[in-house]
Image (cartoon, helix red, strand yellow):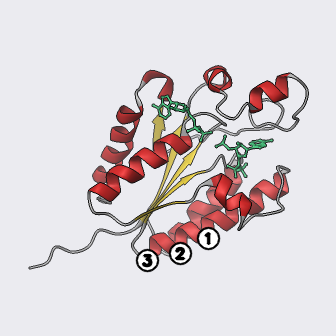
Amino acid sequence: MRTPPTPGATVWLTGLPSSGKTTLAQALASRLTREGHRVEVLDGDEIRTFLSAGLGFTREDRDTNVQRIGLVAEVLARNGILVLVPVIAPYADSREAVRKRHEASATPYLEVHVATPLQVCAVRDVKGLYAQARAGRLSGLTGIDDPYEPPQTPDAKVETQLQSVDESVTAVHALMTQRGLL
Ligand SMILES: Nc1ncnc2c1ncn2[C@@H]1O[C@H](COP(=O)(O)OS(=O)(=O)O)[C@@H](OP(=O)(O)O)[C@H]1O
Ligand SMILES: Nc1ncnc2c1ncn2[C@@H]1O[C@H](COP(=O)(O)OP(=O)(O)O)[C@@H](O)[C@H]1O
């Protein structure tokens, strides 16, 4: 007898720039793929090059970006894919709308707060954005002079400043298993 297929799901990784969203999503995707799952990573930078081309970083544009990504994620997840979304999504109401979209189709949705402290993110500064902001060459950087509303009740909180990438992957993987998604 065939075992029933596991459902798809969206796992949204929200957090500051350089918090570890992309690294965690890619490492988790590799593990899930090795385990035989169908996985997609909706990478913020790639989405902004195509699906959200032309959008900037005003509140309105970020909301539009997040809702577009939420729609694509829900469509994929509803059709059995595990969708990992490493996107800042700084506004709580915008994240809530994405959760509601998933609830409306009974599609599993997990919100993971990649809760690396700002000071650690600013030292990592993977893309040099914090340095640009310090030098006065970039304004509206999330966490510096643009808001980041931390999730009040995330499904998980990942403290990457205290863990290796493997440990963070294991934590999210364990949550997905516990919720019956794997
Ligand atoms: N002003 C400003 N604020 C925040 N981030 C900025 C900004 N300008 C460019 N970037 C780069 O764009 C990436 C964020 O895109 P997202 O689509 O994830 O952001 S959002 O959810 O629409 O707010 C983000 O990627 P990550 O560093 O991977 O988070 C940044 O590299
Ligand atoms: N436990 C961890 N999880 C994820 N990233 C980590 C962790 N520990 C250290 N890092 C490092 O933090 C940086 C995060 O960068 P990135 O994933 O591009 O962040 P973001 O996508 O949030 O902007 C990478 O250099 C990564 O190697």
> For this rendering, which residue is in front, 54 or 140?
54
Q: Amino acid at mark 1?
A: Leu
Q: Residue furthest right?
A: 136
Residue found at x 66% / y 37%: 17
Quick one: SS at disc 3? Answer: loop
Q: Is residue 104 left or right of residue 44?
A: left
Q: Which residue: 63% across, 57% down?
A: 96
- Image quarter in which the N terminus is found: bottom left
Whichever of callouts 1 and 3 sits on the residue coming sooner in the sequence is 1
Q: Quadrant of the C terminus?
A: bottom left
Residue of label 1: 71
**Residue at the spot 76% in from the left edge and 37% down from the top edge:** 142
Residue 165: give x, y in percent of width and height: 42, 33
Name the amino acid type tagged 2.
Val
Q: Which residue is mark 2?
A: 75
User: How many marks on residues?
Assistant: 3
| Distance between mark 1 and mark 3 Cα atoms | 13 Å
Mark 2 element type: helix
